[in-house]
């Protein structure tokens, strides 16, 4: 993510005419040798090995948090108290209570805040949003969303930080389903209640001896418990009457990044697949008999959101451009003094849904979002 974010900061002013323009002043990492190399490779002017020193610097206006989940709250709150704008990776925090404290801090100190749900910013997803808002699908009945990966299916894959509850909070649920939840809230509406199950298929893994990114080297002798879910599945009812099914797993062989959704309404349907991110499949009931069926829209025309800033039609863009497109909104927010969507309010709502799914998996009952917020009061607002 540090690489993806750095690329977006470097490229946003090349493609888009934003008044606020990022200056890659300093990058921070715990390992001095590694962060020094990263600074040189990614184009940062300097580096720090302590995030507190980074926040204390007068030449830093925005703190971008790309750390493991258990440090998001401490860094974000300190940054807000120092008057720095805050951009944070998802999920926002480990708990709903933590996420609310982060929201309180950025609101109290009047800083711009945003959370990184970059998949919202694929032009095809933005076009789907436009079609829904225009009523082209009519009343929404269904969303079915999956986020399927397979990178930890090997039982000898080591116990990296994403498999530690203390560090990340949950597994496939918080890492993958959080994206599906955000897309559902963006496109369909607010969740009302959920019912879920969670499963850990591999209970023990080799203790990690050395890790980098998503990979690592494990001990040949020592093993430790896997504390988070390998897979989660849940049902949802929405405030507007729609229903949804959601599946997130790291055990779907052959799926490298299967982030997909289909939405069905009374007048039509749309579907999208991140592995083919430039295309949006669209179906309208009003089409005449004999010509009905899904059509594929290549969302690279100038009329499609963000696409006109890049290449001629059908000259496709990639994963990295979802970050660049998001960065446009962040720069505009900083320039004009508002917090673009999705921001920490969305992060709190997302966190509440994650906790509701976890509670449902434990109690084997439906859990309403209003009850989750009530139990969290007075520290949490709904």
Image: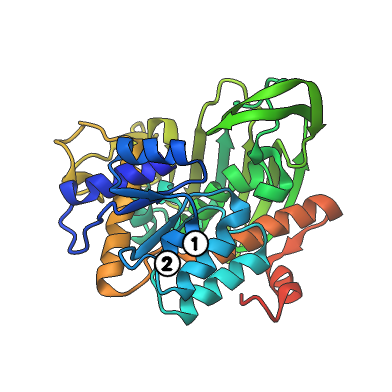
Query: Which image quadrant for residue 219?
Result: top right
Q: Which residue is located at x 42 percent, y 67 percent?
A: 56
Q: Are marks 2 and 1 in contact (CB under 8 Å)?
A: yes
Q: Nearer the viewer, residue 31 or 187?
A: 31
> Which image quarter is the C terminus in?
bottom right
Give how far across and how far down residue 257 sits, in percent: 50, 31
Q: Which residue is located at x 50 percent, y 38 percent?
A: 260
Residue 173, placed above or below residue 340: above
On the image, numbered disc 2 is attached to which residue?
56
Query: Which image quadrant for residue 242?
Result: bottom right
Q: Which residue is located at x 16 percent, y 47 percent?
A: 14
Q: Nearer the viewer, residue 163 or 290?
A: 163
Q: Which residue is located at x 38 percent, y 49 percent?
A: 47
Spatial separation of the CA atoms under disc 2 and disc 1: 6 Å
Residue at the front extreme, as displayed: 32
* Neighbours of disc 1 within 10 Å: few (<14), some (14-19), many (20+): few
> Which image quarter is the N terminus in?
top left
Q: Is residue 54 left or right of residue 162?
A: left
Say which mark, if any, is on residue 52: 1
Give how far across and how far down residue 68 sits, in percent: 58, 48
């Amino acid at each position: 993510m540090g690489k993806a974010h750095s690329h977006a900061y470097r490229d946003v002013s090349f493609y888009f005419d934003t008044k606020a323009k990022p200056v890659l002043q300093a990058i921070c990492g715990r390992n001095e040798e590694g962060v020094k190399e990263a600074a040189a490779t990614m184009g940062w002017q300097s580096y720090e090995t302590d995030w507190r020193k980074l926040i204390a610097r007068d030449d830093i206006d925005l703190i971008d948090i790309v750390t493991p989940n258990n440090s998001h709250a401490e860094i974000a709150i300190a940054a807000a108290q120092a008057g720095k704008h805050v951009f944070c990776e998802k999920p926002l925090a480990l708990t709903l209570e933590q996420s609310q404290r982060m929201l309180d801090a950025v609101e109290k100190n009047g800083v711009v805040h945003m959370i990184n749900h970059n998949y919202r910013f694929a032009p095809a997803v933005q076009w789907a949003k436009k079609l829904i808002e225009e009523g082209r699908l009519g009343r929404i009945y269904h969303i079915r969303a999956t986020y399927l990966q397979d990178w930890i299916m090997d039982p000898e894959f080591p116990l990296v930080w994403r498999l530690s509850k203390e560090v990340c909070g949950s597994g496939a649920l918080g890492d993958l389903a959080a994206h599906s939840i955000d897309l559902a809230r963006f496109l369909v509406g607010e969740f009302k209640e959920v019912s879920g199950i969670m499963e850990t298929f591999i209970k023990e893994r080799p203790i990690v001896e050395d890790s980098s990114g998503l990979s690592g080297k494990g001990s040949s002798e020592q093993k430790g418990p896997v504390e988070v879910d390998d897979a989660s599945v849940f049902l949802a009812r929405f405030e507007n009457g729609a229903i949804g099914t959601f599946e997130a797993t790291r055990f779907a062989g052959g799926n490298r990044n299967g982030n997909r959704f289909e939405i069905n309404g009374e007048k039509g349907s749309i579907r999208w697949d991140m592995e083919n991110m430039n295309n949006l499949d669209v179906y309208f009931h009003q089409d005449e008999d004999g010509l009905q069926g899904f059509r594929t829209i290549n969302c690279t025309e100038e009329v499609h959101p963000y696409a006109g800033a890049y290449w001629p039609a059908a000259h496709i863009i990639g994963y990295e451009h979802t970050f660049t497109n998001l960065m446009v909104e962040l720069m505009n927010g900083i320039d004009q003094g508002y917090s673009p969507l999705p921001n920490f309010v969305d992060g709190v709502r997302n966190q509440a849904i994650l906790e509701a799914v976890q509670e449902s998996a434990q109690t084997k009952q439906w859990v309403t979002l209003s009850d989750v917020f009530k139990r969290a009061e007075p520290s949490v607002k709904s």
